[in-house]
Image: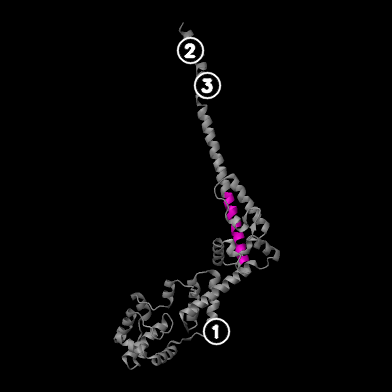
Amino acid sequence: MARRKILKAPDRRELFDIPADEDSLIRHYSLSAADRLEIDLRRREHNKLGFAVQLCVMRHPGRVLAAGENPPRAMLKYVADQIGAAPAVFATYARREETRRDHIARLMICLGVRSATAQDRRAALLSAIEAAAMSDSGASIVNAIVATLRGRGALLPAAEIIERMGLAARAMARRRAEGALIEGLAPEKLQALDKLLDVDAAIGQTRFHWLRSAPEAPAASNLIGLTERIAFLRTLAIDPGLQARVASGRWDQMVREGNSTPAWLASDFNASRRHALIVAQVIKLGEKLTDDAVTMFIKLIGRLFSQAHSRKKRRHMDHRTDTSKALRLFLDTISAPIGQRSGSGRT
């Protein structure tokens, strides 16, 4: 089975790989006068270059150059040019494991760093759990681990170890959020939530699916369907305030997971995860269905006003001829006496 990963390939390269672009080389691998003095203490050219490369890598990305690992050509040339060495001699250094270990030990003293201890890893794990409580992003979680180790003056362990720590932190944060969300819910209420995943003979489907498949088109029957779902959710008596127990980023992740999880799959989750998923869906659906019902009601009222206005216009057009006849008759009626008075005056 393939090993689970928490980082995407670009994030992994950015955190652990040796950079080769010009800006990064200048920023991270420009040697100081003190660096050159320490490097010059090595007698042979390949040892000077190997020592310089190790120094640079232990500063950034903050790890040891692994046995048999060759740095990017651009980085090797940039460092070699600064100490007047030929990049090709690094191949000789790479074959001498004992010299490499001696250089690492010396550089730890010079740079004031150490291999990560159990205490360092525990602190990094706690930082990762805090990051995972806010976000499910693998990059954010692993960055918290790396930042803590660097801040404590510890060299980064292998990338695989850090990724395993990140996966463990994310799993712990998920379990904590799930526990916090359902803490204090009565057993009978949890049983009622589980029944949402069972097929209800009255509707021929699970209530979980029925709640999430609410109609969207504006229609009186669909509005009734929405109100029925809202009324059903209220019978579950799940307090929307439970959402405040979970950080917003973690809450959004729980909702996304619930949105994409069918009832048959949710049934296979462990009790804590299953109940938390359903609670999150119930709270989110309560908000969504209420908003949808209000929006649908407004659309239906608008449609009724529009229909009434159209009928009024049609009635006006239908009676336009009769109205014109009545107006002409009225005009003729008031014009007749005026004409008679004018004729009498001339005689």
Label 2: which secondary element:
helix
Q: Earlier in the sequence, mark 2 or mark 1?
A: 1
Residue receiving disc 2: 339
Image quarter of residue 236: bottom right
The amino acid marked with disc number 2 is Gly
Distance from Cα at disc 1 to Cα at disc 3 = 99 Å
In the rendered image, residue 290, in percent from the top left (x then y), is placed at 60, 53
- Against 86, residue 169 (above or below) is above
Q: Nearer the viewer, residue 157 or 332?
A: 157
Q: Which residue range is magenta in the image?
A: 274-294
| 230 relative to 332, above or below | below
- Residue at image location 68% in from the left, 63% down from the top: 191
Q: Nearer the viewer, mark 2 or mark 3?
A: 3
The amino acid sitting under disc 3 is Ala
Answer with mark 2 or mark 3, whichever residue precedes in sequence: 3
Query: Is residue 186 shown to the viewer in this render?
Result: no
Q: Nearer the viewer, mark 1 or mark 3?
A: 1
* Image spot of residue 259 (x, y percent): 55, 61
Picture disc at residue 326: 3
Asked if the residue under mark 1 is in contact with the one under mark 2, i.e. CB atoms within 8 Å, the reply is: no
For marks 1 and 3, the one nearer the N-term is: 1
Asked where in the image residue 30 lies, by quadrant, the reply is bottom left
The numbered dot on residue 119 is 1
**Mark 2 and mark 1: span between their CA atoms?**
115 Å
Residue at x 55%, y 64% (from the top left corner): 257
Q: Which residue is pictured at 64% across the width and 51% down the height?
A: 228
